[in-house]
Amino acid sequence: CIAIGDFNDDTQLDIAVVNDGTTNTDIFLGFLDIISYPTGPAPFTVAVRDFNNDTQLDRAVVNGNDNDMSVLLGYGW
């Protein structure tokens, strides 16, 4: 699963990728190197939105094995 948004406020679209079968998600910020962020086990979907109304994109990742979710606040990373 992927989600697209401007995660670092540089006016360029970035990509969040869920790595099924792992415990992390990756962010592609423009043409920079991939940044991996830990989540729960078996992440399988991601939603992008400003969940806490601070004008920065956040990510919510649903974790399959634990039946819970990880929320990564602030610039989505």
Image (cartoon, grey):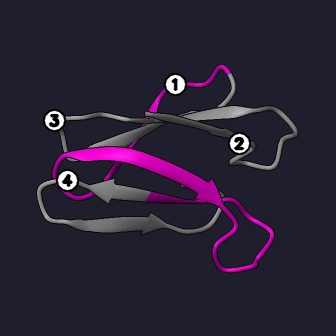
Quadrant of image for the N terminus? top left
Looking at the rendering, the stretch of residues picked out in magenta corresponds to 31-60
From what the image shows, is residue 66 above or below residue 39?
below
Please rate how many residues cluster around mark 2, counting C-alpha atoms within 10 Å: few if below 14, some from 14 to 19, many from 20. some
Q: Position of residue 27 (x, y in %)?
A: 51, 37
Q: Position of residue 24 (x, y in %)?
A: 29, 45
Look at 75% across and 79% down and name the residue there. Answer: 53
Rounded to the nearest whole Å, what is the CA distance between mark 1 and mark 2?
A: 17 Å
Rounded to the nearest whole Å, what is the CA distance between mark 4 and mark 3?
A: 9 Å
- Is residue 49 left or right of 34 when viewed as pictured? right
Mark 1 or mark 2: name the one nearer the start of the chain.
2
Amino acid tagged 2 = Gly
Amino acid tagged 4 = Gly
Rounded to the nearest whole Å, what is the CA distance between mark 3 and mark 1?
A: 22 Å
Mark 3 or mark 1: name the one nearer the start of the chain.
3
- Is residue 29 left or right of 34 when viewed as pictured? right
Residue for badge 1: 33
Q: Position of residue 49 (x, y in %)?
A: 66, 60
Quadrant of image for the C terminus? bottom right
Q: Position of residue 9 (x, y in %)?
A: 81, 49
Label drawn at residue 21: 3
Residues at marks 3 and 1 touching, judged by CB atoms closer than 8 Å: no
Q: Secondary structure at mark 3?
A: loop
Residue for badge 2: 5
